[in-house]
Amino acid sequence: MNMNPSETAFRLATPEDREQILSVHRDAFGEEGKIISSLVAEMFDDPTAEPIHSFVAEHGDAIVAHVLFTAVRIETREVSAQILAPLAVASKHQKSGLGTRLVNEALTQLEPQGVALVFVLGYPDYYSRFGFAPAGVQGFDTPYPILPKNADAWMVKELQPGAIESNEGTVRCCTALDQPQYWQE
Ligand SMILES: CC(C)(COP(=O)(O)OP(=O)(O)OC[C@H]1O[C@@H](n2cnc3c(N)ncnc32)[C@H](O)[C@@H]1OP(=O)(O)O)[C@@H](O)C(=O)NCCC(=O)NCCS
């Protein structure tokens, strides 16, 4: 079901959105839905994930897409950095441009908050549209080794000019994401 783009609102998530957000992830990720929605719940409750930035797309009263950004540390550096994970668009609304609009809105809001770098492990063809580029070759290592075939899926985007150039090192995620199984697919 496609919707009129003008009917979609993009906003920061509130605690009241929690159940609807978890349900979007359960739906969007199919077989993996339960695992991913549990991960999101854990990340929401993880103090090491702070500052968290959580954005939703809403159609009427229904949340139809969600993207979560949580804090990462780059070893030995003081830079403000986040990881985008996960992103989900409800199955009925996929491939209508909603994910693209939500991520663009979110990145626009993160920039003035002083976030310098955003990482993602995801589809290279999808995330390159937002300006993400392979992170490994630019000096940023994943918390756990990833399969060589997925090397291009580990990506970074700078929100402050020069942030990529002036940083390097291993990226450490919040406790909930710091599990080898999330890095091995
Ligand atoms: C992946 C996802 C977030 C994209 O959001 P969306 O609103 O459906 O996508 P958009 O309409 O913004 O963009 C469509 C583009 O995404 C691409 N795309 C969608 N799903 C994709 C996938 N699984 N792999 C690669 N590209 C994908 C489409 O090919 C399309 O490309 P085009 O613009 O060149 O035609 C959404 O489909 C989703 O929630 N999927 C299930 C959950 C998931 O896999 N999330 C992980 C993201 S890392």
Image (cartoon, rainbow, N blue to C red):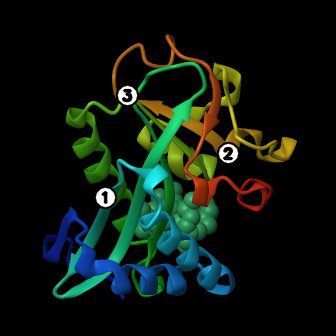
Indicate the position of residue 76 as horizontal and vertical percent values: 58, 19
Q: Residue at x 23, y 36 (%)?
A: 113
Q: SS of the residue at dot 2?
A: helix
Q: CA distance from mark 3 to mark 2?
A: 20 Å
48 or 37, which lies in front? 48
Residue 39 sits in which quadrant? Answer: bottom right
- Verify CB contact (< 8 Å) between mark 1 and mark 3: no
Mark 2: give few (<14), some (14-19) or many (20+) Cα within 10 Å. many
Question: Residue 116, which numbered label?
Answer: 3
Q: Residue at x 39, y 81 (%)?
A: 93
Q: Residue at x 70, y 41 (%)?
A: 143
Q: Earlier in the sequence, mark 3 or mark 2?
A: 3
Work out whether residue 3 can be spotted.
no
Q: Which residue is mark 2?
A: 153
Q: CA distance from mark 1 to mark 3?
A: 21 Å
Apparent side of residue 85 relative to residue 7 in the rendered image (left or right): right
Inspect the image, locate mark 3, and give the three-letter code of the amino acid beneath it.
Answer: Ala
Inspect the image, locate mark 1, and give the three-letter code of the amino acid beneath it.
Answer: Arg
Indicate the position of residue 138 as horizontal and vertical percent values: 63, 21
Q: SS of the residue at dot 1?
A: helix
150 or 86, which lies in front? 86
Indicate the position of residue 116 as horizontal and vertical percent values: 37, 28
Question: Residue 101, which numbered label?
Answer: 1
Work out whether residue 61 can be spotted.
yes
